[in-house]
Image (cartoon, rainbow, N blue to C red):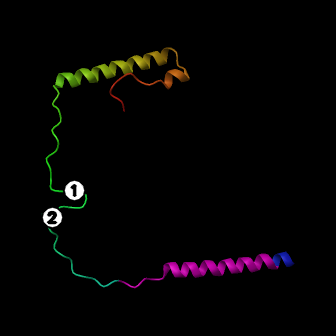
């Protein structure tokens, strides 16, 4: 009987504390006064970015060079798949590719 009363007392105490915390958390906070919106300054630099700078010029590669790199990558991946299908092992599955085009 003493154990039952102890458990009942703790349960009521925990319920009361939970209700008080829940009531405090859900109580509405006082609303701050609403101020009229200010006009944004258009030409002022931002904290994270200054004036708009042109993007850096990327080196222009001919399309043929890009296509040859892609074709080489595809050939290497096909060879890797074929070698895995011929003799699948855990090692062949986890080997790194020799292609410069990594995912």
Task: Check disc 1 and report the residue beneath it.
Answer: 49
17 is within the stretch colored magenta: yes
Placement of the N terminus among the 4 image quadrants: bottom right
Q: Locate residue 10: give its quadrant.
A: bottom right
Query: In the image, which residues are magenta?
Result: 5-31
Task: Check disc 2 and report the residue beneath it.
Answer: 44
Residue 26, labelled with which disc? Answer: none
For the point 18% across and 36% down, the residue is 58
Q: Residue 79 at what x, y percent from top left?
A: 40, 16
Around disc 2, counting alpha carbons within 10 Å, would you say few (fewer than 14), some (14 to 19), or many (20 or more)? few
For the point 49% across and 14% down, the residue is 86
For this orientation, the residue located farthest to the right is 1
27 is within the stretch colored magenta: yes
The relative height of residue 23 versus residue 84 in the rendered view (above or below) is below
Around disc 1, counting alpha carbons within 10 Å, would you say few (fewer than 14), some (14 to 19), or many (20 or more)? few
Placement of the C terminus among the 4 image quadrants: top left
Q: Who is closer to the viewer here, 25 or 47?
A: 47
Q: Is residue 18 left or right of residue 45?
A: right
For the point 52% across and 15% down, the residue is 87
Q: Who is closer to the viewer here, 51 or 31?
A: 51
Magenta span main SS: helix
State the CA–CA distance, disc 2 to disc 1: 10 Å
The relative height of residue 59 versus residue 48 in the rendered view (above or below) is above
Give the structural element (helix, strand or loop) at label 1. Answer: loop
């Amino acid at each position: 009987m003493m154990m039952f009363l102890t458990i009942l007392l703790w349960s009521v105490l925990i319920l009361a504390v939970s209700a008080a915390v829940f009531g405090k958390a859900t109580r509405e906070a006082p609303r701050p006064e609403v101020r009229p919106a200010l006009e944004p300054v258009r030409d002022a630099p931002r904290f994270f970015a200054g004036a708009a700078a042109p993007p850096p010029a990327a080196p222009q590669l001919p399309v043929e060079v890009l296509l040859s790199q892609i074709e080489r990558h595809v050939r290497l991946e096909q060879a890797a798949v074929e070698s895995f299908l011929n003799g699948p092992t855990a090692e062949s599955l986890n080997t790194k590719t020799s292609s410069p085009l990594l995912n």
